[in-house]
Amino acid sequence: MTQAILTATNVLSQAIEGLLDIIKDFRENLQAKRMIRKTKKELNALDDFALKDLGISRGDITSIANGTFYDTKHSRIQPTIEQENENLKGWV
């Protein structure tokens, strides 16, 4: 009898842990989707000049919000001391 009770308790606790994991994953996915929507909304609210100043185009907004953006143009550029802008130190 004791073994049956322990087995039932073990099965029940595993089921509860599984349910809690599902709820946790759902909340994390919901939070990630909210952040993606917020990022898209904020970037779409910028005008073209502000986006150009940031170095992105309207077509890049979705991939930036999803975290899949990879800029091949700027990844190869290694600034030298002469290329650094003194006015932007501390801002960028």
Image (spheres, rainbow, N blue to C red):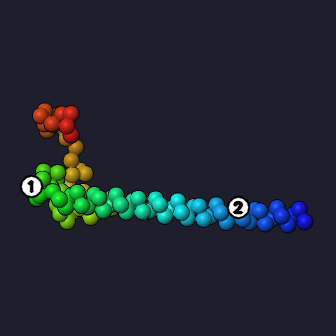
In front of the other: label 2 or label 1?
Answer: 2
Residue 66: which disc? none
Q: Residue at x 87, y 63 (%)?
A: 3
Q: Which residue is mark 2?
A: 13
Residue 72 appears anywhere in the view:
no
Q: Residue at x 11, y 58 (%)?
A: 47
Q: Quadrant of residue 65?
A: bottom left
Name the side, left or right, on which 73 lies relative to 29: left
Query: Within 10 angstroms of label 2, few (less than 14), some, or many (20 or more) residues?
Result: few
At mark 1, the secondary structure is helix
Residue 49: which disc? 1
Name the side, left or right, on which 4 lies relative to 71: right
At label 1, the amino acid type is Phe
In the displayed orientation, state which residue is furthest to the left: 49
> Residue 83: percent from the left, percent from the top?
14, 38
> Residue 26: percent from the left, percent from the top?
49, 64
Residue 86 vs 32, above or below: the answer is above
